[in-house]
Amino acid sequence: MTTTSRGTTTTETTTITSREIRLAARPVGEPTPGNFALATTGVPEPGEGEILVRNTWMSVDPYMRGRMDEGHSYIPPFELGAPLEGAAIGEVIASRAASVPVGATVSHFLGWREYAVLDAGAATVVDTSLAPPEAYLGPLGTTGLSAYVALTRTAPVRPGDVVFVSAAAGAVGSVAGQLARKLGASRVIGSAGGPLKTGKLIDAFGFDAAVDHRRGRLAEQLDRAAPDGIDVYLDSVAGDHLEAAIGAMRADGRIALVGAISTYNATEPVPGPVNLFDAAAKEVTLRGMVISRHLDLFPEWIAKAAPWLADGTLRTETTVVEGIERAPDAFLGVMRGANTGKMLVRLGETR
């Protein structure tokens, strides 16, 4: 190790170097590879109460686009010139915390880098006997939890409901469609882009019907799929999807506002649905959801979902990109709908 001085503080550094992805410039509109920079840095020794983690998997998610912009939101923006952040899984290779031993597999929030030093209290030891480590970034992570919160707390599914899920071939949507059925929905409809994904909704994820948003006339497609209307809508898209869902809603319907990916790259204000008053006339509930405010449901969700994964009654897919250097490509891909299921980056051998 080496020792460096920063003012009056002395920092010991390991012989390990770590590559990381930094925010090089704030995007205007759709991000490009030029908004990211790959850098190499030394890794400090963990201090008292800290752990050193070799990251093996990291997540890229649509909400990260909002953090690339300046301004106040429900989560602070990324800093220019600093590594990005996000959910990651890794192995503890050094520990100065009795609660997290060397060799443990942990989830934490310092992704976008090959190694991370963090307070042990900011990491969660995961049980790899229940599921593979990467599952804790997908169905057993905030992805699966988002579907569970949306359909049990934000817009609860009742027995016999007709449920519509947008971005249904994605990480949250593919879980949500199956969960809606387990909660008693009589019919589950999903939206996806292109015939391959819409076919997968029915063949792999058990949806009753699928609409292809690339074919246009979404409201007409939804009307054919749900001629008697819908009761619950999980919105990850906004725009025409939200407008079509409001039009199809039955009285006392419920809408979970989970995301708005169609608006994330907008450079001007995005108009809302033209039929918003219909929601008032039908007494529809539109409720937002920020997953960080519902983490109390994590143990409950994992207790339900882990056995479903084990017995195959919860089916998931993962789109994997290899190497930290390709993490920006993975993020740009998920923003363009290139993934089926969860988009993950598998981190290669580190130095």
Image (cartoon, rainbow, N blue to C red):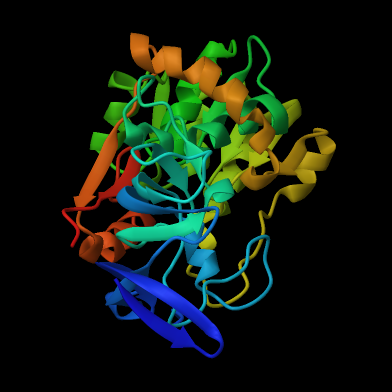
Q: Position of residue 184 (x, y in %)?
A: 59, 10
User: Measured along the vertical axis of the image, is residue 332 above or below residue 182?
Assistant: below
Can residue 290 be seen? no
In this rendering, position of residue 98 left or right of residue 286: left
Instruction: Identify which residue is drawn at 69% across, 72% down.
Output: 72
Q: Position of residue 150 (x, y in %)?
A: 63, 33
Q: Residue furthest bottom?
A: 7
Q: Quadrant of the C terminus?
A: bottom left
Picture quadrant where residue 319 is located: top left
In this rendering, position of residue 40 left or right of residue 208: left
Can residue 274 be seen? yes
Q: Position of residue 349 (x, y in %)?
A: 16, 54
In this rendering, position of residue 324 left or right of residue 27: left
User: Measured along the vertical axis of the image, is residue 41 above or below residue 272?
Assistant: below
Picture quadrant where residue 350 is located: bottom left
Picture quadrant where residue 133 is located: top left
User: Measured along the vertical axis of the image, is residue 264 above or below residue 181?
Assistant: below
In this rendering, position of residue 76 left or right of residue 2: right
Return the residue nearer the eye: 70 or 165. 70
Instruction: Identify which residue is drawn at 46% across, 81% down.
Output: 26
